[in-house]
Amino acid sequence: MDGRSEAEAAPGIELAPLAPPANLTAELVRRLAAEIRAGRLRPGDRLPTEQALMRQAGVSRTVVREAVAALRAEGLVLTRQGVGAFVADPAARGQVRIDPGEMRSLNDVLQVIELRIAIETEAAGLAAERRDMAALERIIQAAAAFDRAVDAGESAVTQDLEFHRAIFAATGNSFFPRFLEFLGPMLIPRQTVRPYLEEPSARTAYLARVREEHARIAAAIQAGQAAAARSAMRRHLTSSRDRYARLAGRLALSQPG
């Protein structure tokens, strides 16, 4: 800190409206991250309020919240309940993570999902074996929040991330949540994939399927059935991998000769 009040918002930050067809969440993350890395938003500065970001960037509250969640996962900001989001001290940021800038293709996304299958399948099994009532309640609440977001027509990225965080926390092994920091915002890749690659109806059907898959995972963990939890998580992530493989194939076909 440099002596300024930590609730003091940095002056002079004014973002131009975002224009479709860009992925609005990913683009807002990119712009805010650029402000932070360029030093125009310094450690301890408060990000503009939700209302200010909505007005400046011309996006919805959901886009703003998902962008802030992605920045938090990347270690660039810290959030304080009822106060706002603040730029994190670089010395406190994780040194090892997957940078969204590294994800240049859907094949990169597929490789990250393969990594997740290996780790999260076991995490689900351990969560079923070790969860206590508080951990189980967090998983159930996260699944319900995802359902509400989908019903509201949202992309539910933040709620999806919290569901997986809750499962990792339920393992009782502190290294599992730290693995999420390694993945950063790439844990939920749909926020970075160009939306025009998929029809809205297909995206809606996919989220409905994710809702069902979350329910099966949560039920197995609640019942303490480790094998079923591992199987349900593997099916969930395999379904996601197959979806992005289809999108990659569609993109390849659309490329000129």
Image (cartoon, rainbow, N blue to C red):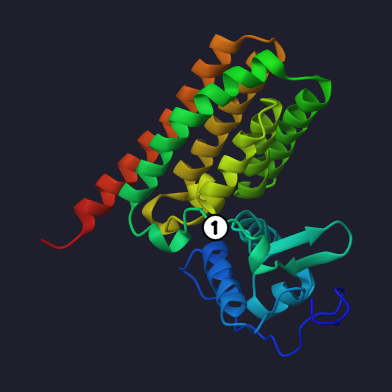
* Residue positioned 47% across, 59% down in the render: 99
Task: Answer few, some or many: residues within 10 Å of disc 1's Cα (few below 14, many 20 plus, some between 14 and 19).
Answer: few
Residue 64 appears in the rendering: no
Q: Kindly indicate the quadrant of the structure image that contains residue 238.
A: top left
Up-down relation of residue 185 to residue 47 (above or below): above
Q: Nearer the viewer, residue 132 or 27?
A: 132
- Asked whether residue 206 is in view, the answer is yes
For the point 76% across and 23% down, the residue is 136
In which quarter of the view is residue 86 placed?
bottom right
Q: How many marks?
A: 1
Q: Amino acid at mark 1?
A: Gln
Q: Residue furthest front?
A: 91
In depth, the one of 200 and 178 nearer the eye is 178
Is residue 82 depicted above or below 34 in this figure? Answer: above
Report x, y in % for residue 156: 63, 46
Query: Taking 126 as reference, is 145 left or right?
Result: right
Which quarter of the rendered picture does the N terminus lie within?
Answer: bottom right
- Taking 13 as reference, is 144 above or below it? above
Q: Residue at x 88, y 78 (%)?
A: 5
**Residue at 85% from the left image edge and 82% from the top image edge:** 4
Give coordinates of residue 22: x percent, y percent.
47, 68
Q: Secondary structure at mark 1?
A: loop
| Residue 70 in the figure: left or right of residue 255 | right
Residue 82's place in the image compared with 184, above or below, is: below
The location of residue 231, given as percent across then percent down, is 49, 16
Residue that mark 1 sits on: 95
